[in-house]
Amino acid sequence: MQADRDSLRSDRKGVLGLPIKLMITMIILALSIPLIVEAMEDNEVNMMNSEMEQEVSKLKDAVSAVHYSGKGSSRTVDINVPAGCEISIGGTGTDAYSVRASFEGKQMFTAYFEKPIVMVPHEILITSGCTLLLKSTYYDERAGIEVTIL
């Protein structure tokens, strides 16, 4: 009978301690889950940023090659834009000398055509994979690239 009483007491301690342990566990989870979700979202953005930087670099290299080959030269380049991303080439003002990348509507970065300094006076928006035809030309005696989506 004494053995039954000892096990009953330890059971009571277990029963009394269980809600406190569950509460502590739930608090730890409640604090941890938002941090884990945020880290996963940041990882996705970083992966997209890296992919977009590679595509923009490929485009800038092709623009340089076309420009240095002389007026009238052309080249094609395949651009792969991940889902949810956009690449915007050229435009008006200072945008004419840049490539802008965005993910889910938020601009990720802007890269400029610096060496050589060339302009794309008409904005081209790319939202999926495509092939671009780049042709070296001049706009008002300024070096430029004509971009056509094939």
Image (tube, grey):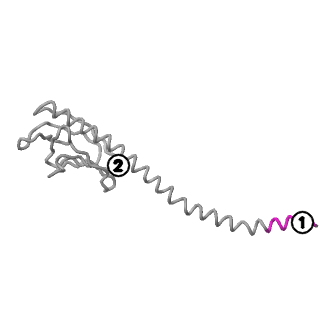
Which residue is at the front of the view, 143 or 41?
A: 143
Q: Give percent across and percent down for residue 46.
A: 39, 48
To which residue does mark 1 refer?
4
* Residue 139 position in % (x across, y down): 8, 43
| Residue farthest toward the top in the current orientation of the protein | 69
Q: Is residue 141 left or right of residue 56?
A: left
**Residue at the extreme right of the image, as rendered:** 1
Task: Report the span colored magenta.
Answer: 2-12
Could you say which quadrant of the image residue 73 lies in? top left
Secondary element at tag 2: loop
Q: Residues within 10 Å of mark 2 (few under 14, many from 20)?
A: few
Side of 150 relative to 6 (left or right): left
| Along the line of sight, the residue nearer the viewer: 114 or 68 | 114
Magenta span includes 150: no
Q: Earlier in the sequence, mark 1 or mark 2?
A: 1
Q: Is residue 150 above or below residue 8?
A: above
Give the amino acid at mark 1: Asp
- Residue at 32%, 43% (x, y): give it: 53
Q: Position of residue 87 (x, y in %)?
A: 26, 48
Q: Is residue 150 visible?
A: no
Left or right of 111? Residue 146 is left
Q: Nearer the viewer, mark 1 or mark 2?
A: 1
Q: How far apart are the two marked residues, 1 and 2, measured between alpha carbons?
A: 65 Å
Which residue is under mark 2?
A: 83
Q: 29 and 148: which one is in front?
A: 29
> What residue occupies the far front of the structure in this picture?
114
